Image (tube, grey):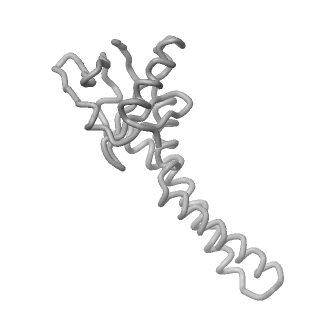
Amino acid sequence: MQISFEYNKNKTIQALRYHFISRKEIRVMIVLVNVFAIVSAILFYTKKIRPEPFLLGTFIWVMMMVSIWYILPFSIYRKTKAFKEKFMITFNEREVILEKEEGFVEWQWSSFSKYLESPHFFHLYFNEKSFFLIPKEVIREDVLHELRSIFKNKIGKV
């Protein structure tokens, strides 16, 4: 099975957001900051604390969300040259072959640790922080089902 694609900037940035939000440490951090903000708001409302802890919690929450939602995805997109290139990817029984004008790379299925499906992409993970995005918009619906079963059998889902 062979697929040719290039990346759409807005959808790629959304996929990067999805990657960051799906990380366990980011989710834990969001929960902790939200709990801190809620507790400080309640304590401030009941006049148990001064406004500074409440304002600090609010500031931390806003900065964290701006970082996760805007700064991280846009900086990764800007730094990664691959998001501006055209690719052809081939899936077969033994390996995945990624080709572009300059050359190609082959990955055995065992090179991937997991895969994740987001609304617009398949995320093929090599490890916790390194992954490759395959856009779903260029794939026919019947091929999408086939790809899902290949990924499930060869890699294993998160």
The one nearer the camera, 49 or 6, is 6
The one nearer the camera, 27 or 14, is 27
Residue 45: image quadrant is bottom right
Q: Is residue 35 left or right of residue 153?
A: right
**Which image quadrant: the N terminus?**
top left
Outermost residue to the left: 103
Q: Position of residue 107 (x, y in %)?
A: 23, 30
Q: Is residue 127 left or right of residue 64?
A: left
The one nearer the camera, 130 or 44, is 130
Q: Residue at x 47, y 25 (%)?
A: 148
Q: Residue at x 83, y 83 (%)?
A: 46
Q: Position of residue 2 (x, y in %)?
A: 33, 12
75 shown above or below 105: below
Q: Is residue 102 left or right of residue 30?
A: left
Outermost residue to the bottom: 48
Q: Position of residue 105 (x, y in %)?
A: 19, 26
98 shown above or below 113: above
Q: Position of residue 152 (x, y in %)?
A: 44, 31
Q: Residue at x 50, y 43 (%)?
A: 17
Q: Residue at x 70, y 77 (%)?
A: 40
